[in-house]
Image (tube, rainbow, N blue to C red):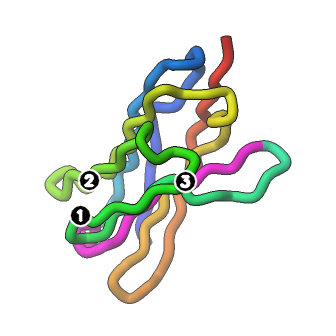
Amino acid sequence: QVQLVESGGGLVKPGGSLRLSCKASKIIFRLSAMGWYRQAPGKERELVATITSDGSTNYGDSVKGRFTISRDNAENTVYLQVNSLKPDDTAVYYCNLITPLRKEYWGQGTQVTVSS
């Protein structure tokens, strides 16, 4: 069973930055696609960013140019650098892993709150 543990969320003022981390428990990490999704109260879960095993990235339209996804295969960790935060970015951010056999796992989520 793969476990994903997110960290790095918190309360930040508009315009601020955070770095979210997600550490996976198994070494299949390097062959897996990773992603970040978010869900705000009363809204559906939405794509934030994804990164494939070979490092190709994709971003949701609302975060392009502000957020950056990266991965460290040696540490089994995926990161999300979030800059120029806006109140609309307030949400629970979830880490996602898809194995080469297309099995999907989710983390428990980390809260990001953007407020002055």
Q: Name the side, left or right, on which 8 lies relative to 108.
A: left
Residue 9 lies, in percent from the top left, at 52, 31
Residue 35 part of the magenta-drawn span? yes
- In the rendered image, the quadrant that contains the N terminus is bottom left
Element marked by disc 2: strand
| Residue 29 in view (yes/no) | yes
Element marked by disc 3: loop
Residue 43 lies, in percent from the top left, at 79, 52
Which residue extends farthest bottom?
101
Work out whether mark 3 precedes mark 2 in sequence or the reverse, and give the earlier one: 3
Q: Nearer the viewer, mark 1 or mark 2?
A: 1
Q: Which residue is mark 2?
A: 71
Q: Considering only vertical position in the picture, is 88 above or below 56?
A: above
Q: Which residue is mark 1?
A: 55
Q: Which residue is mark 3?
A: 61
Q: 58 and 105: which one is in front? A: 58
Marks 1/2 in contact by CB < 8 Å: the verdict is yes
Work out whether mark 1 precedes mark 2 in sequence or the reverse, and give the earlier one: 1
Q: Residue at x 35, y 70 (%)?
A: 33
Tell me which amino acid carries mark 2.
Arg
Q: Which residues make up the magenta segment?
A: 27-40
Residue 52 part of the magenta-drawn span? no
Q: Name the side, left or right, on which 73 lies relative to 19.
A: left
Tell me which amino acid carries mark 3.
Asp
| Residue 36 in view (yes/no) | no
What whole-number distance in Å separates the C-alpha atoms at marks 1 and 3? 19 Å
Q: 70 and 22: which one is in front? A: 70
What whole-number distance in Å separates the C-alpha atoms at marks 1 and 2? 8 Å
Q: Residue at x 37, y 78 (%)?
A: 99
